[in-house]
Image (spheres, rainbow, N blue to C red):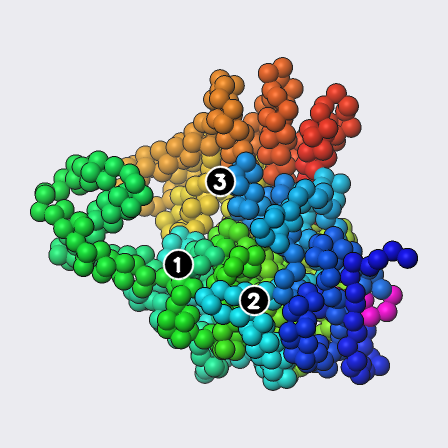
Amino acid sequence: MKKRLLSMLLFATTLSAAARDGFAIVIDQKSLNEAKSEVEAYAKAIEQTHNLRVYTVVDRWGVPDSIRAELQRLNALKTEPIVGTVLIGDIPVAMIRDGQHLTSAFKMVQTQPRKDSSIPSDRFYDDFNLKFNYLDRDSDANYFYYSLAAEGAQRIHPNIYSGRIRPTDAFGTNRYDKLRAYLRKATAAKQQQRTLQKMFYFSGHGYISDSKVARIDEKVAWQEHFPQLRDGRRNRISYMDHSDFNPVKEHVMGEVMRTDLDLAVLHHHGSWDTEYFNAIDRPYTVKAAKEYIRKNVRQHVVSAKERGRDWEKTQGELKERFDLSDSWMSDIFDPELNRQDSIEDAALDLHLEDFAFYGYQPNAPVVVIDACYCGSFHRDDCIANEYIFQPGGTVAVVGNTVNVLQDKWSDRLIGLISLGGCVGDIARFSTYLESHVIGDPTYRFASAEKQLDIDHLIHENKAATWRKLLKSPQADLQCLAIEQLAVAGAISSAELRRIYETSESGLVRLMAMLRISELRDDNAIAVIQQGTQDAFELAQRQAVRLIHESGDERLIPSLIALSIENNTSDRVNFDASTALGVLPKDKLMAEFARQWDSPAVQTVHKDSTRAVIARAIEHSADFRAGTLNELDTLTNEKEIRFAIRSQRNDMVHAYVPFLLQYIDRPTTNVEQQVTVIEALGWHKQSYQTPVIAERMQAISNDPKYAPEVRSEALKTYNRLNAR
C-alpha cells in the first residue's frame, strides 16, 4: 500500500440533512496540536453557520502538489464537495513564475532574485484549471517554485475560494498564541451573525491620480453593491481623503477601529510593511516653502551619505539646481533636525510597528486593502497579518502579494458578501494571481432577506440559474450571472450589448463592457464607444483602457472627443494620454482637426489651446512608437529585451506584423524569440489578435523552432483564446 502524504480528519460534529457542500481546513500537524480545540470550534461554527461539511486535511509532508491533489479530489466528490478552503499555519507557499500575464501589474524581469521575481499565489491551490511545472524549492524558506505551464488555462477562474491564516513570531510574539486567539475571534464572529450596516472608504496620496470624480462615483457604486446602505437619513457610507488631514494616519486608524464599522476599503500605495497615506504637506506660505526646500535637500544629502555615495557631489548639484545659498544648507547634518525629519516622515504612513506603538486594533470585520504588497503573507510579517492578528474585530483582509494596477476593478462582485457569498469570493473573482484573503474566507454578512447559497450555485454552474439571475434586482447577482455565462461562452455579444445599453446600473454596464470587449466584434466596438461617455467614472476609465488594448481605429473619434473635453476626470485623462500612444498619429491628428474645427467646440483662446492639445497628442504617439523604431538597430541584449518587453504595456498594434517578422530574423536568438512571443500574448483584445493567434498556433506545431519557443507560442495562443 502506498503511503499517503496527507491525512484527513473529520471532526465529529452533527450535520443537518440539508448539508450539500463542504469546506477544507488544511493545517500542519504542529499547528493542529497547538490549537486543536480552537480548530474544532472553528470547524463546528462553519458547519453550523454556513451548513458546510468541514474536512480537516493535515499536511504531514509539506508538498504543495499533494495538498492540491487532495483539494481537487474533495472538490470532485459527488456528495458534499468542497467549495472553499483555508490554509492554516506553515502550509508551503507556491511561488509562480512565467505567469505575469495573470497579474494586474507585476512585470519584474525574472533574472532578478527568484524570491522577488516570483509571485506568491494560492491560485495554485484553488484554480485546478491552471497547470504548473515544478522547478525547485528554497532551503531557507517554505517556498516551492513552479512555472505556469502552457498546456493549462491562461486565465484565472478558481474552482474553489481560499484564504490564508499564517501567524508568525514577528516582533517577539508566539505564532501559536496568535493562532489560538485568532481562531477564537473568527469563531465568535460567526456566532454574531452581523449584518452590513456601515462602511468606510479611504483614498491615499497619489492613487488613481487623486481623481475626485472617481471617488464621488465610487460612493454610488457602493450603494449598488449594498442597497441597504442607501439611507436618506443616516450616513452609512463614510469617506476620507488623504488631503483632509496631514498626517491622516490617526484619523484612518480611528475610523477602522470603530466597533460599529462593518467594512473598510483602503485605496493607497503600499509595501509589505507600510500603508502609504500622505505625502509631505504642500507649503502655502513663503516661510513654509523655504523649509520645504531645505528639508528636501537635507534628506537627499543625508540619504546619499548613508548609502555610501558622494554626498558632497549631491549637495553641489542640488545647490546649483535650486540656486541655493550656503546658509540654506548649513545644518544638513544637524542631529535634532534629522531626528525631527524622521518623526515627521514616520507620521505620514502606517507601519508595522504602529500597531503596537499606537495600540491600533482594527475592528471592521472585513478590510480590503487596495495596495501593492500589503498582503504578502509569505513574509515573516505583513500589513494584512497585523490586521487580523490584533485583538480587535477584524477577521478577514483582502490584500495583494505583489504590486497591483491602480485602474483595476478592485471591488468586483464585493456585494456578494451580503447576498450569501463569502469574503473568499472577492479574491476568487478578482481574476488575478496576487489577490488573496488573509484570514477566514468563509466570513459573510447576514441579511434580513433570504440569501442564496452562491458558492453552491457556482459549483453547480447551471446556465439556467444564471439566466434567472440576469433579471435579479441586485447588481452583483446580475454581474455574477454575466461572468459565469461569458466564461461558458453562453451569452452573445448582441445580448451583452443590450444589457449595456439598457441597464441603469454602472456595475452591470461595466461587467457587460469588460466581457463583450473580449469578443472584439462590431458590438464590442459600439459598447466601448458608448463607454467613453459612461456616467460611471470607472466604466468610462475602463472604456479608455480598452481603446488602448484594442487599437481599433474606429475608436479614434471617441478618444479624441475625450481628449478635447474641458473637464475630463484626472484618471480618465491619464488613461486617454496613454491610449493615444498606440494609434496612428496621422489619423489621430486628422480627427483632432476635424473635431476641433467644429463650432460645437467652444473654449477660451481656442487657437493657442489647439496648439497645446496638438502637441500633447503628437508627443504621446511618438513616445510609444519610439522604442520599436529603434529595435532593428539595437545590438545590446539588455536594450533589445527592454524594447520588446515594453510592448506588454505599450501595445503599439500597428507594429504587430513587424514583431511577427522579428521572430524569424536570422539574427534573432531563442531568448529573443521567447520574449517577443510572450509580449505578443498581452495583445488579447487587439484587433490584431486573430493574426497573432494564427501565427502562434503554427509556431507551436513547427519542429523547426526550439522547444521553449514552441511552448511559449502555445501559451500565448491559449492566452489569446481564453475566456
Q: Tell me what residue is drawn at x 77 percent, y 77 percent.
A: 11
Q: Nearer the viewer, residue 538 or 258?
A: 258
Q: Amino acid at mark 2?
A: Pro
Asked whether, in this view, residue 631 is left or right of residue 417, the answer is: left
- Residue carrying label 2: 167
Q: Amino acid at mark 1?
A: Tyr
Where does label 1 land, which residue? 276
Disc 2 versus disc 1: distance between alpha carbons? 23 Å
Q: Which numbered disc, 2 or 1, marks the residue closer to the eye?
A: 2
User: Which residues, given as a range, are shown in magenta?
Assistant: 78-83
Dot label at residue 579 = 3
Expressed as whole percent of the image width and height from the top left, the position of residue 213 reads 42, 59
SS at circle 2: loop
Camera-nearest residue between 348 and 558: 348
Please identify the quarter of the rendering in which residue 62 is found.
bottom right
- Tell which circle, 3 or 1, labels the residue nearer the N-terminal end: 1
Quarter residue 276 falls in: bottom left
Quarter of the figure that contains the N terminus:
bottom right
| Coordinates of residue 643 in the picture (x, y in percent) | 50, 29
